[in-house]
Image (cartoon, helix red, strand yellow):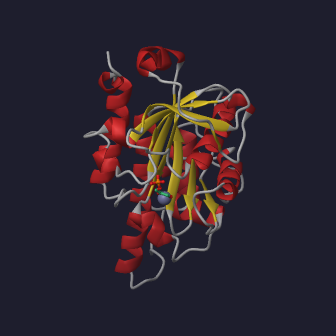
Amino acid sequence: MTVTDTPLLKSFTRLCEDGFRQGWHEANGGNLSYRMTGEDVAACEPEFSFDRPWVEMGVQANNLKSSFFLVTGAGKFLHNAPLCPADCLGILQINDAGNAWRIVWGLENGGKPTSEFPTHFMNHSVRLAATDGANRVIYHAHCPNIITLSTLVEPDARTWTRILWKSMTECVLVFPQGVGVVPWMVPGGSDIAQATAKLMESHDAVVWTQHGMFVSGDTFDAAFGMMHVIEKSAGLYLAARAANGGNEPAFPISDDQLLQVCRAFDVRPREGFLAR
Ligand code: 13P
Ligand code: ZN
């Protein structure tokens, strides 16, 4: 089986296409990475070549030494990933020191991994530790309602989380830890990677103010679903606020109602975010 025929490639490119259809991936906006299993590597290895150079990342992780990632390429349109995967996507091997990558498959025609790979890499490291290895997918999208909301609301995690939980009943069950919020920063480097990874230690989702969002998940469906739920909730809030003349929605879900939902589904919301 060739790399492009593997179920992994199909799941990966399906998410790219689904995100594009949602309007989250204008031009090259957004990126995706997946930490491969031993079986994934074994299935793809016959097509690997090890002649491309190591490139230092400016970040390091002990728990990702010698691992392999499937990633989108810098400047590549996610919409094109299903059409020409070997050009748009690449498989990276991490070196023994955990601080450099080399391309072992794909990114033909001189491509490079996403400019946000330092953030993906650090997020993988902290989510691997936080979930005992369960999380494998890190996804970044330019979801418009999240970006709009960040032009209206201060970059404070509690404020954001309460808005999102109170706009749709089951949000508190989907992201009980709430969202982390990174204030505006220059994208594409190790500073924003460190700031995001710090928040990813205790969140599945982190907003990049006026830019978009990062989410993590065990599977492509889980990561996509997380992005979808949070983005939809932001849109509901914005619509309600616009319909109310720009004022706060008149009847948001109350703290007590959210606690009732949590009790019914045995979920513990983030401490201090709801009044008891
Ligand atoms: P890349 O094309 O390098 O993945 O960048 C897209 C993006 O969303 C940067 O934040
Ligand atoms: Zn981006």
Residue 170 seen by the camera: no
Q: Is residue 91 left or right of residue 76?
A: right
Q: Residue 235 or 146: which is nearer the viewer?
A: 146
Q: Is residue 200 left or right of residue 83?
A: right
Residue 132 screen position, x and y as percent: 66, 26
Q: Residue 184 or 238: which is nearer the viewer?
A: 184
Report the residue at 68% width, 53% height from top: 190
Residue 268 screen position, x and y as percent: 63, 42
Residue 226 screen position, x and y as percent: 46, 46
Residue 97 seen by the camera: yes
Is residue 209 placed above or below 33 in the rendered structure? below
Residue 108 screen position, x and y as percent: 38, 38
Report the residue at 33% width, 37% height from top: 85
Quadrant in the rendering for residue 276: bottom right
Report the residue at 64% width, 25% height from top: 66
Report the residue at 70% width, 48% height from top: 58
Quadrant (top left/top right/bottom left/bottom right) for the N terminus: top left
Q: Residue 67 or 232: which is nearer the viewer?
A: 67
Q: Furthest-bottom residue in view?
A: 245
